Structures are given as structure tokens and as C-alpha cells.
Image (cartoon, rainbow, N blue to C red):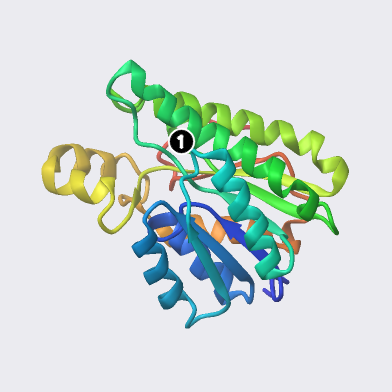
Amino acid sequence: MDLGLKGKKALVTGSTKGIGRAIVETLLAEGASVAICARNAEEVATAVAELSKKGKVVGSAVDAGDPEALRAWIASSAEQLGGIDIYVHNTSGKPARKLEGWINNFNIDLMALVHGVDAATEALSNGGGSIISIGTTATTEHFASGSGSYSALKSAVTNWTLGQAQVLGAKGIRCNVVSPGPIMVEGGDWAMIKQAMPPFFEATEKGHPGGSLGDVSDVANTVVFLSSDRAKHINGVNVTVDGGFLKRIDF
């Protein structure tokens, strides 16, 4: 299926590794040009050099929790790419271990989304666009102790994004959420859990009907499809990518 993404311009936050990196690689494979960002300047430079072998990529070191820096990156990316058709919000802070740490999730998970969308809306509405926030299945259940700030703020991300489907939909901008379940990321949390907590990892695997965790490509493929013209009538939807890990019956 031709997704119609050739020549499209996409911005993906938190995109030098993991799920964000996979989203960028999939967008490039479909012919889009992409702007990336992350906090570590060296990692951004390395990622741009590697990804540029697959298509047009620009990038900058950005702290998504800094509204001015994020807005400057969006403006610069739009200028370098020649517009914005797709905006993927993928930045997230780690779960807070102490109450004062909740502000980190508030700034990086939620407010980075609100500021990012506000800064990108004018460009996205020029001919229509797509906004996709990366959520989590942890918003629907108590998953693990200590994850309260992450789950709570991701819930806010989901609620706000889906609400914008009504507000921005009138401007031709679709707003959707993709919520991964446990996904194996090289060097990521589940890779560490597999080494440090084998029984918990094995129990999580058994919780999947298919008996295994998902891969970053499972999430990336969903995001890229939703961002494409092939999904032009999908707006205000939270798509779960978890291999059936959640046991709810969702109508």
C-alpha cells in the first residue's frame, strides 16, 4: 500500500533512539523528510549522520521541557523542511520517585505537547496535517509501583490530544494517540528488566496472547499509517499496540 507520504514533512520529538528512532526510519522509508530532536547534542549529530543515508533529516539538541527551545526547534525545522505535515509527540520523562519529581513529567510529557502543537498548528493547517501523541497502556490500569506520575501525565496527554481532534479537526488537522504496551527496546527499560528481574519479565511475556513483547517497528508502523493520507478519516482515536496485553473488552 502506498501511504502517500513521499514529500511530506514530519517532526518527531525524542527521536534519536527507541520508538522515536523507529518512527523516523519508517517515515524516511516512505519518502518523508524528517526533523528530529533530543537533549543530547552528540546523539542528535550521530543520528542525523546515520539517518541521512536514508533520506532528508535535520536535527537539533532540544530540551522539550523548555518551551522556548522547543518552539525555536519547530520554527527552524519548518523552515528547513519547507513546512510541517506531521507532528509526533514522543518525549516523556521517567516516572517520578518523589513527589517533587512530578513536575518533570508535567513539563516533558504534557506541556511539551501543548507548546509543540501550538507552535506547529499554523503550518499543519496549511493543507491539513496529522498530530500523533505516543501514549501508553499504563493509563488504563495500575501497572507498577512508582509509575504514578508517568501514568497520570500520559493520561492527560491522551485526553488533551483526543480533545484536540474536535478543536483542530475543524482546521483539517487530525489528532490521534498510539498507546504501546510493553515494547522491547534495545537498551531500554524492558531490556534491563529482562536482565534484572527475569520472573517479572517472563510473567509479562505470558500475559500476551502471543507470548512475547512487541517490537519498536510495531509502534512505528502504526504511527506512520495514522499519519498518512490512507488514514484521512481516522481522527480522535487512541490505538493500542500491545498484542492483547490488556484484558479489557473495548467497544
Residue 131 visible to the viewer = yes
Mark 1 residue type: Thr
Camera-side residue of 24 and 143: 24
Classify residue 31 by image quadrant: bottom right
Horizontal side of 171 relative to 134 (left or right) equals right
Query: In the image, residue 67 lies at what x, y percent?
Result: 57, 39
Task: Name the residue at 54% across, 31% down.
Answer: 249
Where does the C terminus fall, quadrant-wise? Answer: top right
Horizontal side of 203 relative to 9 (left or right) equals left
Q: How many marks?
A: 1
Task: Name the residue at 42% across, 77% down.
Answer: 49
Task: Name the residue at 33% across, 50% down.
Answer: 213
Q: Which residue position is annotated with label 1?
A: 137
Residue 248 visible to the viewer = no
Q: Residues within 10 Å of mark 1 (few under 14, many from 20)?
A: many
Helix, strand or loop at disc 1? helix
Camera-side residue of 223 and 107: 107
- Name the residue furthest bottom: 53
Horizontal side of 130 relative to 209 (left or right) equals right
Q: Is residue 36 above or below residue 2?
A: above
Classify residue 3 by image quadrant: bottom right
Q: Is residue 155 above or below residue 49?
A: above
Where does the N terminus fall, quadrant-wise? Answer: bottom right
Query: In the image, residue 140 lies at what x, y percent?
Result: 48, 27
Task: Name the residue at 60% across, 58% down.
Answer: 11
Query: In the image, residue 233 lies at what x, y percent?
Result: 79, 51
Query: In the image, residue 29 lies at what x, y percent?
Result: 56, 76
- Name the residue furthest top: 99
Camera-side residue of 184 and 156: 156
